[in-house]
Each structure stands twice: as structure tokens, then as C-alpha cells.
Image: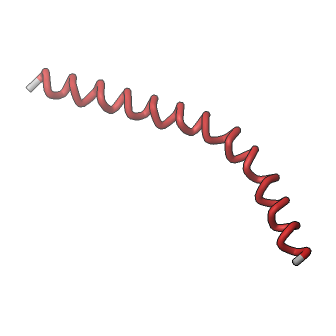
Amino acid sequence: MIELLLILAIVAAYGSWFLHRSAEDAIPFLADLEPKLRASKNLSGWF
């Protein structure tokens, strides 16, 4: 039973770390994507 709790604790810690890392990686990606989306909106406004 203790082993199961330990495994669950490790998985939970790794999962939260992984989510935190992917959020850190996603923020610059989204910040980079926003001007591109704005530019494409402006381009579609010309047509």
C-alpha cells in the first residue's frame, strides 16, 4: 500500500512539473503566434 502511494505521489509530482514546463513553453509560442494571427486578419481584410 505504501509503495502504491509513493508511486502515485511521484506520478503526481512529475505530472504537475510536466504541465508547468509545457505551460512555460507554450507562453512564448502563443506570444509569437498572436502577431501572425493579427497579420493574417489584416491580410484577409484586404480581400
Badge count: 0
Question: How far across and down, in percent of the image, does residue 33 sit?
Answer: 73, 50
**Image quadrant containing the N terminus:** top left
Residue 44: x %, y % from top left: 83, 72
Q: Horizontal and vertical percent for residue 38?
A: 82, 60
The one of 1 and 31 positioned closer to us in this rendering: 31
The one of 2 and 40 positioned closer to us in this rendering: 40
Q: Quadrant of the C terminus?
A: bottom right
Apparent side of residue 32 relative to residue 17 in the rendered image (left or right): right
Q: Is residue 21 above or below residue 40?
A: above
Q: Which of the pair 12/38 is nearer the observer?
A: 38
Residue at image coords 37%, 27%:
13
Vertical relation: 29 (above or below) 42: above
User: Residue farthest to the right?
Assistant: 46
Q: Quadrant of residue 15?
A: top left
- 31 left or right of 23? right
Give the farthest residue toward the bottom. 47
The answer to whether 43 appears left or right of 32 in the picture is right
Which colour assignment does the render follow?
Answer: secondary structure
Residue 19 position in % (x across, y down): 47, 37
* Furthest-front residue in this view: 47
Give the quadrant of residue 17: top left
In this picture, residue 6 sits left or right of residue 15: left
Residue at the spot x=23%, y=30% of the render? Answer: 8
- Identify the image quadrant of residue 39: bottom right
